[in-house]
Amino acid sequence: MRKKELKEKGITLIALVITIIVLLILAGVSIATLTGENGILSQAVKAKEKNKKADIIEMSKTDILAYQTKNGNDTITAEQYKAVLNQYFQEVPSIENLEEALKNPEYSLKTKPTYGNCDIKLSDIYAGTVQFTEAASVAYSELTVGDYVSNYPVYYDNVGTAVDIDNETIALFPKDIYNKWRILSIDLDNEVVRLVSAGVPLNYYNSYDSKISVENLTTKFFDIEISSTLTPYKFFKNGFKTTSTVTSTSDLENLFYNDFTDVYKEGETYTDNYNTFSYIEGKPKVQSMTKADVDEVYGSSTSNSTYVEENDLLSLPCYDDTVHPYCNTWLASANSINHLWMVHFAGMISDAHSYGSYGIRVVVSLKPGIKFISNNEKINDTTTWNIAIK
């Protein structure tokens, strides 16, 4: 009898262990079914997101249909289409960029957080015709020296303008707002506009022989090889943005071969106070600002007693203006054999040449007849334009 009881207890223990194992296996299978990549919960989340996408697509299509009904045809204007996108999506492109985005069938936008942060292709919303009306350009007489241009195709990041040669460090960075272009001069008769960088995309180590410096900053602008060091006569830092790394001046020069930048014609020259230099035919019209440019901006010959104001075309307020109010920038024209003009960090226009190295305000000449279109934005209460080809 005792043996039988022990035997029955042994069988019960084994059965319990087996039952627990079976339950664990079932639990594992159940958890995997619920939470796995293809589990019930994951599928539910995907289904919910899919439904959100479908809802947003449907709402967008309904809004578009309403505009088409209002227009009396099956098209929609760019402004109307953008208004629909603005309702549901984040970071909707500007009208100017939207036309380009629609050419890519894979282009997508992320919905606003209230609509689930979903990625939706624009082609899933609407594949019909969007009418882009050409914006009216303004007469050149409406432009003003100092106005900003926001869509010139060569972009850059600001770089520092003062150099500690002993420690090979760069300082005095412009404020972030100064990374666009501004109108430097306007030729009303020939409809030619020159732009100057509103920041400092290039730094340059100048020669103490100003004849060499002036030539390098004007007619030989792309002849001096880029260097990562402070070797004399070389670009040592550039902030131009491009899809590939700028490692040589030929890379840099190629950025300015575009639909907007003019090129030098045969026989064009540059003359400073003492020397005349010849430009190379076919090169982009790109160089440093000159003393003559400064005089034109002020309407008279500037001197060492001239100071810039914070919002002047010629001033570059420093990012940390507690150190210095302005960044140093070179002006190519010389007033003696050993001097170059510059805008000093205190804001004074100076003919000193003893400060080592300074940033270059790059100047480009646009092709004749470029259109200027208002983009309804202001920088420091100054008008901003977009440019387009006529």
Image: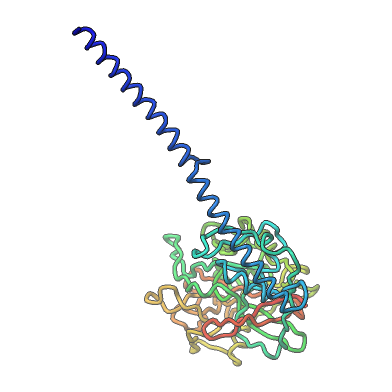
Q: Nearer the viewer, residue 205 or 337?
A: 205
Residue 202 visible from this viewpoint: no
Residue under the point 63% across and 80% down: 375
In the picture as drawn, the residue positioned furthest to the bottom comes out as: 300
Colouring chosen for the image of the structure? rainbow
In the picture as drawn, the residue positioned furthest to the right comes out as: 266
Residue 334 visible from this viewpoint: yes
Give the mark count: 0
Q: Nearer the viewer, residue 308 or 217?
A: 308
Rendered position, 193 above or below 45: below
Q: Position of residue 309 (x, y in %)?
A: 48, 86
Residue 374 position by quadrant = bottom right
Q: Position of residue 214 (x, y in %)?
A: 62, 73
138 left or right of 247 in image: right
Q: Position of residue 153 (x, y in %)?
A: 66, 69
In the picture as drawn, the residue positioned furthest to the front comes out as: 1
138 left or right of 320 in image: right
Residue under the point 75% across and 73% down: 131
Considering the image in quadrants, where does the C terminus appear?
Answer: bottom right
Rendered position, 251 above or below 387: above
Rendered position, 22 above or below 255: above
79 left or right of 1 in image: right
Considering the image in quadrants, where does the N terminus appear?
Answer: top left
Q: Position of residue 284 (x, y in %)?
A: 72, 69
